[in-house]
Amino acid sequence: MDDLDKAPKLRRGWTTGACATAAAKAAFTALLTGEFPDPVEITLPGGRTAAFALAVNRQGDGTATAGVIKDAGDDPDVTHGALVLATVRAGAAGSGVQFKAGPGVGTVTLPGLPVPPGEAAINPVPRKMMRAAIAEAARAHGRSGDVEIEISIPHGEEMAAKTLNARLGIVGGLSILGTTGVVVPYSCAAWIASIHNGIDVARATGLTHVAGATGRTSEDAVKALYDLPETALLDMGDFVGGTLKYLRTHPVARVTIAGGVAKITKLAQGMLDLHSARGRVELGALAEVARECGGSEALARRIVSANTTPEAFALAATEGIQLGDEVAARAWDVAAEVLAGSPTELDIVIFDREGKLAGRSQPKAVHAAPPKR
């Protein structure tokens, strides 16, 4: 048995959408009957049921409020431990279920997201879940399901400052998210969804140039290099392949991929997932690039023995070999192959650890897959 076999399984958790649905159902039931079901059971999108304990239950003048503490399991979720509150009040006859953003829940201000501007930042699947839960409770008690649901999250605005909501045009707090109701630890689904949302917002607001960056240093540097607005920046992280694939089917006129020397060298060597666990820079291949650029055999041997990719770049510079532009050009080939067929102009920029430009490719149109080197 190896260490992976011994490792405990990561515990799954619940999305904010599932917690909001449970709170809304409990509050609506109390509005109808005067009693809060605790625990309250809901049906998740896949058909599975789940029960939630209530942390808050109170009734006011024509309203009922229930609250659920979000348990994100073993996922490092910014909303883990947050109190998700639903306040329900009767709506006008025939109005159906209406949604309102309470304190700590954001409002959408830019087009391109699944919810239009002016609406509470409650995504379509959580809305569907809440409508289904309200309809179920209404049928059970022979009543109308015409209600207003106000979702709030105490301190949600402070939590939202740690997310990309502001860049996406969501102001005033968090989004109510989730497509399955279940949080899978370290699945990165939310990160990838935020990349897609960023591209959608950029397109909907008419931006013609977006930049995907692997980290904060490269993001700040590419923003300054091209004087880009916040909404043009994609927090791509290691997901360059996923970013490019979405841009292929949701094109923007110009795309810049920005990153540090190690990340972009990995892209140049054909890797589309740049996480350190997915693969390392092949220093032998980088040494060959140095040879092709005029470097000596002694330099090639030193590069093969280098501890890090930045060290390899620094060794090349001692012989006047600037690897950056050549690596960027090769990374362009890899990225352009993923974008092939899209009406997009692509360039690659490399920055060192201080954010200084270390290499770049020329912006070129991507029409078909580039020839293999």
Image: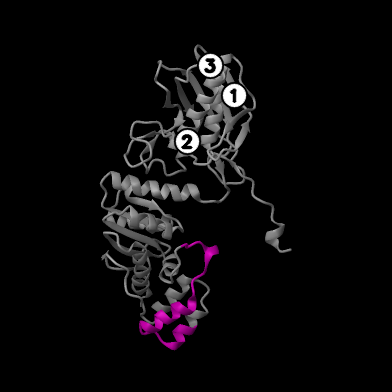
Q: Is residue 176 found inside the magenta-colored segment of the image?
A: no
Q: Earlier in the sequence, mark 3 or mark 2?
A: 3
> Hey, what amino acid is under mark 1?
Val
Report if residue 358 is visible in the image: no
Report if residue 158 is visible in the image: yes
> Label for residue 154?
none
The secondary element bearing badge 3 is classed as loop
The secondary element bearing badge 1 is classed as strand
Residue under numbered circle 3:
142
Above or below, comparing residue 199 to residue 65 in the picture: below
Residue under numbered circle 1:
56
Q: Residue at x 64, y 24 (%)?
A: 38
Name the foreground residue: 81 vs 1: 1
| Residue 241 on image: x %, y % | 42, 60
Farthest residue to the top: give it. Answer: 61
Q: Quadrant of residue 236?
A: bottom left
Q: Magenta residues: mostly which secondary structure?
A: helix
Q: Which residues are magenta?
A: 273-301
> Hey, what amino acid is under mark 2?
Ile
| Residue 152 on image: x %, y % | 48, 28
Q: Earlier in the sequence, mark 1 or mark 2?
A: 1
Q: Residue at x 54, y 44 (%)?
A: 77
